[in-house]
Amino acid sequence: MTEPAGHPVPGPAALFDPGAPDLPTAPIGGWRTAIVHSVRHPTPRSVAIRLDVPDRVDHWPGQHYVVRLTAEDGYTASRSYSVASAPADPQLELYVERLEDGEVSSFLADELRPGDPLEIRGPIGGWFVWTGGRPATAVGGGSGVVPFVSMLRHAVDLDRTDLLSLVVAARTLADLPYADELRAAGARIVLSREDRPDRPAGRLSAADLAGVPVAGARCLVCGSAGFAETASRLLVDAGADPAQVRVERFGPSGGPAPLF
Amino acid sequence: MPGFTRGFTGRARRADPRLPPGQYDVGTDFPVLTAEVTPRVRTETWTMTVDGLVERPSTWSWDEIHALPASEYRGDIHCVTTWSKLDTSFGGVSLDVLLDAAGPLPSATHVLATSTTGYTTNLPLEDVTGGKAWIVWTHDGHPLPVQHGGPVRLLVPHLYFWKSAKWITRVTLLDHDQQGFWERNGYHDHGDPWKQERYSGD
């Protein structure tokens, strides 16, 4: 499942270059009927779902899955969710934020039970990935930290957590997915509405990224459109080459300002 | 595969014939999904080039492309992430005008569109000719915002929206299909929303 060990992982410039030689390709999986192993509600607005997936194609950390729900009349609704588990995990873990009026997320948060079958498709996406081949700096906001949890767990499996620098943001610690795990791993925690011992409440700023590796590191940003815009600009201002910054935005276009 | 999902009823059905299968109406929102740092494209230095298998490789400046006959698209757009935006409008120039000026060679079958960021996407030539594709710089009458590809993007509204490359700067005609950015990362080479051509293999 890896980008081969010792093989330099091609940067985005190479991926963008139509003349680039063939590159390691991320795994792609088709539709599976998974069985829900467990459902956990880390916060009132979220659900972590662990699935047993038959004939699973192991993902690269950062890839996502599509979940498809089908009503009795054949109506379907599909949404994409990041994987939180490591590739070596025998189960697949998806983390879902429950959105107001979220057609799929509210079902997953409120209705899904252990033992239920669930149609999923994945892994998908070969861009927003990190497999441990080189240093990476990851900046995530809200449920945008989920792909970085997969990367962190993978780094733990590889015993290479030294390669991963994490900056994670939320409104409060209680709103931060996998807060305990991220804190234990030494992630910098940025809270917009809650003071921390080492940091007063406030949105992500340049000071929060001071000293994070940018030169020679793959930079990864994931969050709402507003958060991703802010974080990617801050990384570039901190010296990151824009061509080395990979961004995953999600959710609605939002208001004039990012939430965190 | 289960016949249906226990307990799932879904939203109230609105039999809107404009929505392709698996899509929902996002309403007035306009989500932003891009894979790279948003570039700052300066109209003073931006150019649009049509090259590759053409008789006359051609380049237009910002002012020159605005002097071409104006054209508008009114209708719907569809994102592979399942949102659709209905009744939009975009203004610019028909890609036909640029292609006619450059003169595609008979051997040209596909195009590769390239953005200032290096983002690429591939399309069959027949999907960008005959009034199906535009180079646009306005959305609903206003200058196209940078997060939506401003100042200028490709618009191919009958295909999933990742084909409508933001910050377009080049269209290269080829005699073969050469995968672009998302297509090499698991997404479909064609991307017809009515056939749900979302991922490779669909």
Image (cartoon, coloured by chain):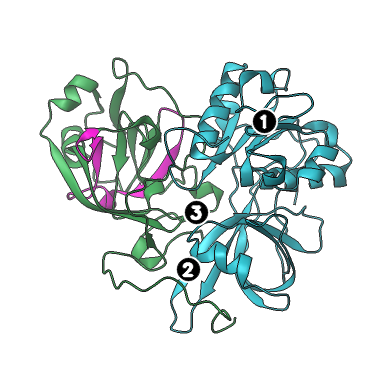
Chain colours: A cyan, B green
The label nearer to you, 1 versus 2, is: 2
* Element carrying mark 1: strand
Point out which mark residue A77 bears.
2
Residue holding disc 3: B187
Q: Quadrant of residue B59?
A: top left
The span shown in magenta is: B116-142
Q: Chain for mark 1? A: A
**A38 in magenta:** no
Residue holding disc 1: A218
Say left or right for B196 vs B151. Answer: right
Q: Can you give x and y, in whole percent of width and height, for residue B145 in the image?
A: 33, 32
Q: CA distance from mark 1 to mark 2?
A: 34 Å
All told, the count of numbered labels is 3
Task: Farthest residue to the right: give it.
Answer: A159
**B140 in magenta:** yes
Q: Can you give x and y, in whole percent of width and height, for residue B199 in the image?
A: 50, 59
Position of residue A72 relative to residue A250, above or below, is below
Question: Which residue is at a point 31% across and 39% down the rendered structure image?
Answer: B154
- The amino acid pointed to by label 1 is Arg
Residue B107 in view (yes/no) = yes
Q: CA distance from mark 3 to mark 1?
A: 23 Å
